[in-house]
């Protein structure tokens, strides 16, 4: 008799043999017999398959699916959920890992809330080497939600944690519902690296019962963005700004209150730090001009943009670099 799987971990990966072990170790060390791992490999050219085979020796409940060609993270995520046998699929990045006892905590909450369409967990950012925690974006808009919260409609959910739903390792989806949405909607227009966000939005609109888990369950590795390696820095900004905007617009409409709340939160919580990181990395004046043009085109209607974002372009790069170096030195010493 085949055992019943409660949670499948779905890991899309490509050329991350050097980091995927962190994710697998953290899952396997907490896994029970009702847990499996599904890995979809988007045509890796490194030794990812060899690494996965080693882990299968100690944890046989791993499915490994290898593609002959790279067709994008959206389709790899969909394949993870398609192959998942679990009632829920916890999507996980190939360079993040679980916090201690995170799986036990989540399994208990899923048992207590049996009709969930899915859940979003909180997380902590870590430096690139995963040696110490660093400042993290608030999981809810302006950090107003400070405990577990059950959302009963999609508008309220995305107004509060819409940006957080864009982080893959924080999302746990009901497998059946996800697959139903995939079957019922035309998804091609949203194959823009944010398809997960679009599908989750449709899931919550169909079955509005989504749990936000405030406990920090995931360690997220920063400074390891595979999109930059693949498409370049400016195209990565287009994904973050234009493609995400189109996804939210497709779910709620560009004139909706939800849309405005999400992008106001982006200006408050995320864009200042993202721009500071780019400048600390020494982006050129020409690139900054392109970035300023892109941002202005998308956010000129927000007064906050002119007050909080535009002035950052006039601060010299070396100041951001110095501040970052001091901050990381302090965090390293205190941890």
Image: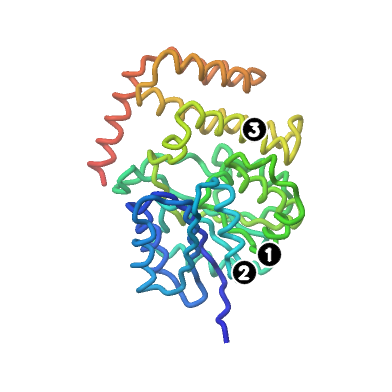
Q: Residue at x 47, y 38 (%)?
A: 227
Hey, which residue is sitting farthest left in the picture? 333
Local SS, label 1: helix
Distance between mark 2 and mark 3 Cα atoms: 31 Å
Task: Give the residue at mark 2.
Answer: 87
Quick one: 212 or 24, which is closer to the camera?
24
Position of residue 309 relative to residue 233, above or below, is: above
Question: Which residue sits at x=57%, y=83%?
Answer: 2
The answer to whether residue 127 is above or below residue 278 is: below
Q: Which residue is mark 3?
A: 245
Upstream in sequence: badge 1 or badge 2: 2
- Residue 73 x/y as whole percent: 54, 47
Label 3 residue SS = helix
Nearest to the observer: residue 13 or residue 139: 13
Q: Point out the image quarter for the N terminus.
A: bottom right
Looking at the rendered structure, the secondary structure element under dot 2 is loop
Q: Are marks 2 and 3 in contact (CB under 8 Å)?
A: no
Residue 206 or residue 246, whichever sits in front:
246
**10 Å neighbourhood of mark 2: few (<14), some, or many (≥20)?**
some
Specify few, some or many for label 1: CA neighbours under 10 Å numbering under 14, 14-19, or 20 or more.
some
- Contact between marks 1 and 3 (CB within 8 A): the answer is no
The label on residue 176 is: 1
**Horizontally, is 270 left or right of 317 in the view?**
right
In this view, the residue in front, 231 or 331, is: 231
Q: Which residue is depicted at the point 48% across and 51% down?
A: 42
């Amino acid at each position: 008799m085949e055992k019943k799987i409660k949670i499948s971990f779905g890991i899309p990966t490509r050329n991350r043999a050097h980091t995927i072990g962190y994710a697998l170790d953290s899952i396997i060390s907490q896994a029970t017999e009702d847990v499996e791992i599904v890995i979809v490999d988007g045509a890796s050219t490194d030794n990812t398959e060899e690494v996965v085979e080693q882990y299968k020796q100690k944890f046989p409940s791993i499915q490994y699916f290898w593609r002959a060609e790279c067709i994008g993270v959206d389709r790899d995520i969909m394949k993870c959920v398609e192959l998942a046998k679990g009632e829920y699929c916890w999507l996980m990045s190939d360079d993040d890992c679980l916090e201690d006892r995170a799986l036990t905590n989540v399994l208990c909450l899923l048992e207590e809330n049996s009709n969930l369409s899915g859940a979003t967990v909180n997380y902590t950012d870590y430096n690139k080497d995963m040696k110490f925690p660093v400042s993290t974006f608030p999981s809810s808009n302006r950090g107003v939600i400070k405990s577990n919260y059950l959302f009963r409609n999609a508008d309220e959910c995305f107004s509060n944690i819409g940006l957080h739903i864009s982080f893959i390792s924080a999302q746990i989806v009901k497998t059946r519902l996800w697959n139903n949405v995939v079957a019922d909607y035309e998804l091609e227009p949203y194959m823009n690296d944010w398809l997960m966000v679009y599908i989750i939005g449709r899931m919550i609109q169909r079955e509005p019962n989504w749990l936000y888990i405030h406990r920090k369950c995931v360690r997220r590795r920063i400074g390891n963005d595979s999109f930059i390696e693949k498409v370049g820095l400016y195209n990565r900004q287009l994904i973050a700004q234009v493609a995400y905007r189109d996804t939210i617009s497709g779910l709620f409409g560009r004139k909706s209150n939800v849309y405005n709340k999400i992008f106001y939160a982006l200006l408050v919580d995320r864009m200042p730090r993202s721009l500071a990181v780019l400048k600390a990395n020494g982006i050129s004046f020409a690139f900054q001009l392109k970035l300023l043009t892109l941002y202005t085109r998308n956010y000129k209607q927000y007064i906050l943009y002119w007050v909080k974002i535009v002035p950052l372009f006039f601060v010299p790069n070396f100041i951001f670099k110095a501040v970052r170096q001091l901050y990381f030195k302090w965090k390293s010493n205190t941890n």
